[in-house]
Every structure is written in structure tokens, then in C-alpha cells.
Image (tube, rainbow, N blue to C red):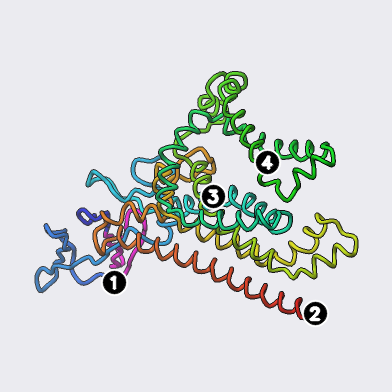
Amino acid sequence: MPVPDRRLFLALNDAGELALYQALAGLLWTGAAPAGEPLGFDAEARLLWSDTTGIERLVVDAEHAEVNWDTLWRPQHYQGHAESQHRWQASVTDSADEPKYGLAPLAWGTLKAAAYALLFAIPLALGAAIHSSCFMSRQLRHRLKPTIEMMEAMPGVVIGFVAGLVLAPYIERHLAGAFALLLVLPMGLLVGGWAWSLLSPHLRQRLPLGWAGLWLMPWLAVLIALSLWLSPALERVFFGGDLHLWLEQVLGLDYVSRNAMIVGLAMGFAVIPTIYALTEDALSGVPASLGEGALALGATRWQTLWKVLLPAASPGIFSAVMIGAGRAVGETMILLMATGNSAMMTLSPLEDMRSMAANIAIELPEAALGGTHYRLLMLSALLLFVFTFCVNTLAEVVRGRLKRRYRRLEGRS
């Protein structure tokens, strides 16, 4: 017996047991049926039950029945779909349609955005921190570090605006050149270092390694300009003149203008100052006697870095990465403006996604207070808080151990 407009079903078996089912959640309740027999439902969806004393009106109290652990996190067989799938679609246009409250696509989008952001930010931030702490000249370091740290003050809405309205269309037009940069820049840095080693001693004194972060900038700018300038030619030679079509036909990938790659670049740019500042502080906080002792024993500067300085600073570097991850998971405006906000579960960096934080910003103003949709948005906020709290707590615990280790090392030196 279906409950009107509720997607609930009452079933009465021969043993006199009454059970309540929901279309997605399944069995909700079972118990002994009262004496008599059911007559149906009235206009207010109350169950009319006939017994020897007359007719009773029973209220079916099953608020938020469509939500349980399975419907939130496991694929469901929704109406109109041949296979079970993860879906989030809280707003429906037709009363016959059912809202889909799967949190898995939102959690996936949150972790996917954070992963691509960290994939872009960690190598650059750690490399910059290592170079500025161990190899850069003191004069340049004192100017560079405050500049990078000031990047953290840039509002996320500005970064998201630039990423969504400037960066995304530009990369869409020069996609082949953007992919070429992934190979050109690392190889260009190696070529630049090799060319520096071939210079005469006089020229190498005028271009010291401590200032490499400055005199390499023109060379990198030339490589970037060359890659983007050759983008149309690369697309014609290797991809038949249309890289987007080639990706779709050969690899089965759909390219979306505002995708995870754009989010990774934009949010990675926002996370870099945090990871850089904490990592640089951790490396600078290593007692100088450790590095000096390794050099005195005949180790090179590279061996001292890998065998002594990085292991000693590893807890601080770990905490820096964890705090950066917490920042990436909780970011809202960049994801809101730099993606199409479609709740999809794919690994491709060229497709869309929606994060929990962006979903709350989009749907909370339209959610009915106290309703299922509203409560699930509050649950999403709670999950984000718990995740970032655990990550930041772990980072602080590791940092505390790092400080205690420094004190012991300084006491022994």
C-alpha cells in the first residue's frame, strides 16, 4: 500500500506484521499490526485503520526516510536509470521526480580538487623553500620570502575570477601549448643548468647559483612564450588540428572549459604561500651545526640537503603539506567560480566536479530550514570541519615534536 506523495510503502503480511519501506532506503520499520484492517489513506496521508471500535487515523511518522548511510555513500538505482549510480540532485522540477542525496560525488570532488591543487603546489612550494633556505643569497631571500608570503593575502574570489574568466578560456584555446609546458619547463630547467655549467668561470661568477631564481626568469619566460606560440602548429602536426576532438575520439575524454586542471592551477597558487612559508621556517630552524658538521666531514651541499637537512626538517615539512591540504579542502570561492559545479565522479583532470564547500554556498540559500536538504548541507559542513580539524591537529602535533627535537639537538651541539 503506497503512502501518497511520500515514496513510502506499507506492507501487511499473513502473520499480522506491518512493515514500512522506502523506495531507496528499503525497510525502515516493522512491528505488530493493530487489530482490524487497513482501509487506505485520507487526503492528509493518514492511514485509516478499521477495528471493532470504529475507524482510527494513524500518522506515518517517517521524516527524512529517504536518507540513510547506504543512500548517502553507495550507488543507488534511481528511477529512470538502468544502472545504480552516485548522484547529487537536490532540486527537482517535477513532483514525480525524486531528489538524489548522494554525498559521494561531493566528497569525491572535494578530494579531487585538493589532490590536483597539491600536485601543482607541493613541488613548486617545496622546491622554492629548499632553494631559498639552502642555496639562495641572503639578500635575495629577504626580498623573496615576504613577497611569496604576501600572496596568501590575495582573496580567493579574485583568484577564482581570474581562473574562471581569464585562465580557463585561454587554456582552452591553447590546450596543446599548455600540455607542452609540462615537458618544456622541466627540460628547460635542466638545459639551463647544463648551459650554466659550460660557462667560463668569469661568467659563472656573474651568474651565481644563489641568484638563479632571478636570472632564470627570462629563460623560463622565453620557454613559456615559445610553447604557447607553437601551440597551433603542435595541434596540427600531432592531433589533426583539433586536440579536443582527438581527446574525445581516441581517449574518450570530454574537455570542459572549467575543469579540475584549472582548479588545480588556481587553488595550487593559493596554497603555495602556506606550504612555502612553513617549509622554509622548518628548514631555517634546523640547527646550523648539523649542516656545518656534514660539510666538515666532506659531504657536498646536495648530500647535506638530502641526508641531513631534509630528514631533520621532515616533521615540519609534513605539517606544512597537511596544513596546505586543509586549506585546499576547505576552499570555496575558487571552486565556485573556476568550475562548472557538476557533481561528477571521474579521475580526468579535464572534466567538471563539485566540492562540498561550493555545494553549500550554492544550495544553502534555497534549502528549506529543517528539511532533509538543509540537514544534509549541515552534515557536509560538519564533515569539512572534522576533516580540516583532524588535519590541522595532526600538523600541530608533528610540529610540536619537531620543536622538541630541535631543542635536544641544540642542547647536544
Which residue matches tag 2?
A: 412
Spatial distance from mark 1 to mark 3, Cα to Cα? 59 Å
SS class of the residue under badge 4?
Answer: loop
SS class of the residue under badge 3?
Answer: helix
Q: Looking at the image, is mark 2 or mark 1 earlier in the sequence?
A: 1
Question: Pointer 3 and pointer 4: residues touching (CB < 8 Å)?
Answer: no
Q: Looking at the image, is mark 4 or mark 1 earlier in the sequence?
A: 1
User: How busy is the neighbourhood of tag 2: few (under 14 within 10 Å), some, or many (20 plus)?
Assistant: few
Query: Observer-nearest residue: 294 or 384?
Result: 294
Q: Looking at the image, is mark 1 or mark 3 earlier in the sequence?
A: 1
Closer mark to the observer between disc 3 and disc 4: 4
Can you tell which mark lies on residue 238? none
Q: Is residue 307 left or right of residue 246?
A: right
First to last magenta residue range: 10-32
The residue depicted at 36 percent of the width and 58 percent of the height is 26
Which residue matches tag 3?
A: 268
Give x and y (percent) for residue 361.
34, 54
Spatial distance from mark 3 to mark 4, Cα to Cα? 22 Å
